[in-house]
Amino acid sequence: MIVLTYGTSFLLSEHDSSVGLIQPPCERHLGPSARIDSLRKAPSARHHPPITVTPGTEESGGLADYELIETQTELSDLVPELAKEEVLAFDTEADSFYHYFDKTCLVQVATRKQIYLLDPLAMGGPEALKPLAPLFASQDIRTLFHAAEYDIYVLKRDCGFRFNNLFDTMVCAQLLGYSGIGLAALVERQFDIKLPKDEQRSDWSARPLRQKQLTYAAADVRYLIRVAERLEKELRKLDRLSWAEDEFRTLEKREWPDREFDRLGYLKIKGARALDPQSLSLLRELYLVRDKRAREVDRPAFKVLGNRTLLELAQKRPGSEKELGAIKGVTDLILRRFGREIMGAVERGMKRKHGPIPKSTGTGRKRMDRRTEHRLAVLKKWRGDKAKELALDPGVMCPNAQLESIAFENPLTAAAVAKAGVKAWFGRSCGSEIAQLLRDLEAENS
C-alpha cells in the first residue's frame, strides 16, 4: 500500500505497460475543435514543490511536479500545449459549502506527464477560463472527469463551455458493477495507493491556497488517465464500452435551468408538514428572511441558520430577543447581527395562518391502476434478476423512474421500449427481453 503524504514524492511510472492508450472513438468529425490548430505558443508557468508518496511499491519512484497557472498570459501560453494532447484529465473545485453564490475556484488539468492547477480567481474570475473552450469542444481530445456531472454543471454555468468527447470514470465503474465507485476507491483498487481526503471541505475561494490544498487538488487528477485506461479495457472485455459512451453523450448534452430560489422550499424541511398552520406560517417567513440574509452576506443558507433551528423557532414562537437567544442554534453573534430580522419574521408569521399546502410540492408521479402496479412489480422482479446476472446495481441499469415509465406505457416491442424514456444502451440490450415479458403478461391477463 502507498499512502499519499504532503511533502514527499509520488508517481506511477510514466508508462504503465499493463494498459494501453485510450483509443479515441472512431469516425471523428470536424467541429469547434478546428480552432485549436491555430494555437502556437509555449507555456511559461511557474513550477511548485513536488507531491510525494511514501515509497512502498515499484511504481512509487518519480516526481509529480505541478504548475500553478495564475495569470491570463500563463493560461494563454499553456492552452496550445494542452491542445497537442490526445487525452486530458480534469477536475474542479468550487465553494458552495462557503458561499451562497458559488463559483469555480480551481481547475486541475493533467496530461500524461504534467499537472497544472488553474486559478481563475487569481485571473479575475471563472470567465477567465474561456481559453479552455476549444479543448472541451474538440472531438480530437478526450476529456476525462470522475463524477463529471457537477464539474460540467459549474463549467457550463460559469464559462459557457460545450463538451464533445467526455469520459467519466465513475460511470465506467458503475457499469462494471464496482462496489466502490469513488475516485479514492478506484485508485486504491487499481494501484494500491490511498489518496488524501482531508481537504474535501476546504474553502477553495480563500487565497492564498495552502500547500495542502494544492497537493490534494493535484492528486485528484494525477492517476485519472491511468484509471480510465484500465476501466476502458475492462469495459471492452465485457462489451460494455458502448454503454459508457451512451452515458457520456447524454452528459455532454445535459443542460440545467438557471438557478432559482424555491419559495416553497420550507415545506421540504424535515418536520415542516407536521406543523400546525400558525407554526407553518412562521416557518415560511423565517425561511424567506434566512435566504435574504444569506444573499446579503454571501453565505450558504444553512450556515446562516440551520433547518433544525428554523423548525424550533417556528414551534416555540419567541416573543422577545431574550427568548430568541434561548433557542439552540441562535448564538450571540446571530442575535446581534440578525436578531431583529428574525423577530420581524416571527411577527409577520403570527399575523396569519398558513393556508392549504400547495399540491405542486408533491412528487409529480402519476397514480397507478392495479394493472400498472402489477406490471411494475413484475418489471422490478425482472430487473433484480437481470442486475444479478450482469453484476450491476439495479438503479444503474434502469432507475425506478424509467421502470415506472415502462410500466405506464406497456411497450410490446423492442422499439417501443427504446422510446419509453430509458437509457439508449439499456433499450438496445434489454428491449427485446422486456417487450417479450410484457407480451407474456398481456397474454396471461387476457
Image (cartoon, rainbow, N blue to C red):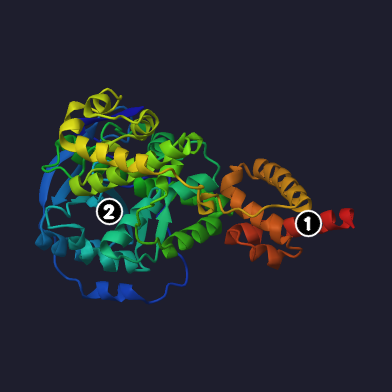
Q: Amino acid at mark 1?
A: Leu
The answer, for residue 209, to whether it is visible in the render is: yes
Vertical relation: 193 (above or below) 167:
above
The answer, for residue 222, to whether it is visible in the render is: no
Q: Which mark is residue 111?
A: 2
Q: What residue did someone put label 1 on?
A: 438
Q: Element at badge 2?
A: loop
* Image coordinates for residue 6, horizontal then vertical, percent: 20, 31
Q: Which mark is residue 288?
A: none
Report crowding for label 1: few under 14, some 14 to 19, many 20 or more residues within 10 A (C-alpha). Answer: many
**Looking at the figure, which quarter contains the N terminus?**
top left
Identify the residue shown where x is 26% and y is 28%.
324
Report crowding for label 2: few under 14, some 14 to 19, many 20 or more residues within 10 A (C-alpha). Answer: some
* Image coordinates for residue 224, horizontal then vertical, percent: 35, 47
Farthest residue toward the front?
351
- N-terminal of the two: label 2 or label 1? 2
Q: Quadrant of residue 434?
A: bottom right
399, 404: nearer the viewer: 404
